[in-house]
Amino acid sequence: MPETDKSLEVDKVRELQRKLYVCAKRSKTRRFHALYDRIYRSDVLWKAWHRVRSNKGAAGVDEVTLRFIEEQGAAQFLEGIQADLKAGRYRPSPVRRQYIDKGDGKPRPLGIPTVRDRVVQMATKDPEGTPIEPIFEADFEPSSYGFRPKKSATEALEAIRIAGNQGHDFVVDADIKGYFDSIDQEKLMVLVEERISDRRVLKLIRKWLKAGVMEDGTVRETLAGTPQGGVISPLLANIYLHLLDRIWAKKCGSLGVLIRYADDFVVMCTTESKAKEALRQVQFVTNKLGLVLHPEKTRMVELTRGKGSLVFLGCTIRKKRSILRNPRRHYMQRWPSPKAMKRVRTRVHELTDPRHSGEDVKQVIAKLNPVLRGWGNYFRTGNADRKFNQLDSYVYERLTRWMYRRVGQRKGRVEKWSHDRFVAMGLYRLRGTVKYPAQATPGRSSLSRVQENCTHGLKGVC
């Protein structure tokens, strides 16, 4: 497809997004119909295909890969989808069950749809919003940050920092037990039907929910939940927990600040009594939705003068004295959690395994850089100087060991290799990449902030 045609189609899709968003924003009670025919528009399907392809991902139960589709012709593939949707012949396949490590020794179940189903789901819900996402985006509360256009985990972490610095020192740290597997599908569809009246779109969503899961060659029916890993699952998960956001904004805002990222959320309160009442209200709403708060992971934390800390979105969050701003006061700070550090060190260890000693050092560096850059970009907006320096040192240690074990290298020659020499060969260095949010920009260089983070005796956390 010519580039000019692609840009024209993207413009048409964006125009459709804006129209739906504006209409939904103007009327909170309007239900939308005649959406199904927009899903199989050629421009929408092509945009959905480009999104799915850029996200990469494995094949589903049909074992059809992205590469195979490109070799056979994407145009023919999309024409087939369009014809099936128009004629009402489209039937989703079961998702392929796969497990990944959560980091705590417990497996996290994922459901991998086929590429065909991912394209149709993306056409129905796009990260930038196509047929149905802008309708619900018009309703979503500012307290929701997860899997939304122009929202991010960094913004959620910043909201916590700001609330903590404003005196919200009592935190309800909530964890929903098996959220994606516990969603009541009938209650979810009732919430979807508050805004969508197009029967064919509703039928399409029901088909995805009931498609089933294939594991070990056996297809199992899904009576509850939405497969974690599907393109449309994050939107459906946000729609389901929007009830909590809505109730909190209308009735419970005086208790504290709700900050939610998908199924992870905290409530920041100014007093212990408000925090206890906030927890009671959260339990009431989650019970209404058929959800259960994890009894061991849901807890109350007091942040006053660094008494306690919490881990949210991979960051350890704690109040510390600031010698740069006011040594008598404590301010919110965050840095990579022990689990986040362990994960990245494990990945670095894998990439610098001695079994790869036959490779050139530049090849090893080329594999390390995307890991270090991606990890660093996520954590660089906090107070991560010390953790960044620790990881830089670990990477250097692993590379020098790799060089030592490489065939033909003598120990004396390896000892002459400095960190700067690896950097000169292209190694990404984390030190110096911390970018503080505008409100927390230090008056001096970030080097002094490293010293500040080490003066409070938080061994293993600082």
Image (cartoon, rainbow, N blue to C red):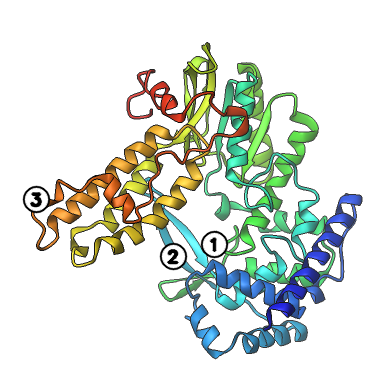
How packed mark 1 is, by other alpha carbons closer than 10 Å (few <14, some 14-19, many 20 or more), is: some
- Seen in the picture, residue 60 relative to 311 is either above or below; the reply is below
- Seen in the picture, residue 169 relative to 360 is either above or below; the reply is above
The residue indicated by pointer 2 is 98
**How many marks overall?**
3
* Quadrant holding the N terminus: bottom right
Percent position (x, y) of residue 407? 11, 63
Left of 135 or right of it: where is 339? left
- Sequence-wise, the earlier of marks 2 and 1 is 2
Name which residue type carries label 1. Answer: Gly
Residue 361, picture quadrant: bottom left
Residue 411's label in the rendered image is 3
Q: Describe the element under mark 3 as helix, strand or loop.
A: helix
Question: Do the CB atoms of the residues marked 3 and 2 lie less than 8 Å apart?
Answer: no
* Quadrant holding the C terminus: top left
Residue 27 visible to an observer of this rendering? no
Q: Nearer the viewer, mark 1 or mark 3?
A: 3
Q: Residue at x 75, y 42 (%)?
A: 141
Percent position (x, y) of residue 350? 28, 56
The residue indicated by pointer 1 is 229
Residue 379 visible to an observer of this rendering? yes
Q: Residue at x 77, y 74 (%)?
A: 8
Left of 115 or right of it: where is 187? right
Residue 55, picture quadrant: bottom right
- Sequence-wise, the earlier of marks 1 and 3 is 1
Q: CA distance from mark 2 to mark 1?
A: 10 Å
Question: Do the CB atoms of the residues marked 2 and 1 lie less than 8 Å apart?
Answer: yes
Percent position (x, y) of residue 405? 13, 56
Name which residue type carries label 2. Answer: Gln
- Seen in the picture, residue 244 relative to 413 is either above or below; the reply is above
